Image (cartoon, rainbow, N blue to C red):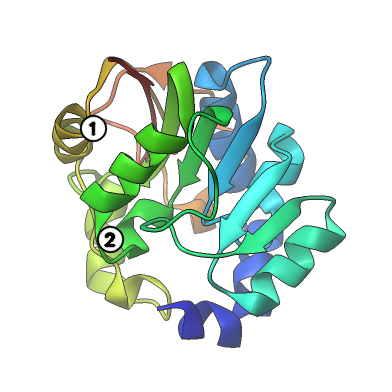
């Protein structure tokens, strides 16, 4: 999977410039549930386009070309995968996984690794294209260069994975109510899920 992003890293990064209203809408939804303080890590940091805007200082990604760009954006990045984080126990106050969950080999293992490296009552923030939404259905049919190998999740499926990995206290915000290509303004986030194509989910590690 990392080879796709290594090869098309410039195309990936450019998408956020040409679809800026979708990108800014996603940022707003994530900010609703992102901790205001503490040290954060983004798994699947990519080119750092989210981490840099959200103030997340650390990132991990398997794509060498992508982490070069993330480093240029000021992110302290390491080459690695979510299933085996090159990080000690109880290090971070929060972890963000934005879009990335649908691309990992073993989502449950990734979430267990998140639990390991999070501090007591640490938060996990997951951003997904909701499989059950109009946007999720569109991408599953479109089969873009990136999403053709994606394993999309619904919000309920993500919550089930999180509960199995021993996370609770869920909070969700949704945004993107039109296809990104047709957006001409920022879509404000709304609590919950079921209408928006992008959903930001927060949960807390418990003992």
**Residue 22 to residue 146: above or below:** above
Q: Is residue 148 visible?
A: yes
Q: Is residue 177 visible?
A: no
Image location of residue 190, percent across then percent down: 42, 18
The C terminus is located in which quarter? top left
The N terminus is located in which quarter? bottom left
In the rendering, which numbered label is found on residue 162?
A: 1
**Residue 179 to residue 66: above or below:** above
**Residue 148 to residue 162: above or below:** below
State left or right for residue 153 relative to residue 122. Answer: left
**Dot 2: within a 10 Å radius of its alpha carbon, few (fewer than 14), some, or many (20 or more) residues?**
few
Looking at the rendered structure, the number of numbered marks drawn on it comes to 2
Q: Which residue is mark 2?
A: 138
Of residues 55 and 91, which is closer to you in this image? 91
Which element carries disc 2, helix, strand or loop? helix
What residue lies at 27% left-to-right and 44% top-to-bottom? 130
What residue lies at 68% left-to-right and 15% top-to-bottom? 37
């Amino acid at each position: 999977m990392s080879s796709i992003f290594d090869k098309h890293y410039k195309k990936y990064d450019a998408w956020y410039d040409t679809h800026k209203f979708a990108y800014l809408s996603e940022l707003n939804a994530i900010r609703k549930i992102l901790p205001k303080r503490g040290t954060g890590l983004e798994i699947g940091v990519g080119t750092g386009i989210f981490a840099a805007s959200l103030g997340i200082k650390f990132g991990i990604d398997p794509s060498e070309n992508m982490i070069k760009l993330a480093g240029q954006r000021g992110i302290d990045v390491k080459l690695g995968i979510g299933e085996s984080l090159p990080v000690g126990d109880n290090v971070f106050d929060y972890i963000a996984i934005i879009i990335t969950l649908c691309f990992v080999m073993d989502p449950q293992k990734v979430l267990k690794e998140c639990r390991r490296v999070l501090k007591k009552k640490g938060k996990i923030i997951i951003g997904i294209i909701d499989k059950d939404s109009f946007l999720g259905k569109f991408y599953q049919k479109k089969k873009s260069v990136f999403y053709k190998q994606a394993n999309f999740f619904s919000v309920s499926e993500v919550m089930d994975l999180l509960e199995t990995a021993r996370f609770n206290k869920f909070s969700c915000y949704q945004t993107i109510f039109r296809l990104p290509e047709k957006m001409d303004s920022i879509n404000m986030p709304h609590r919950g899920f079921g209408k928006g194509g992008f959903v930001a989910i927060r949960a807390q590690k418990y003992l």
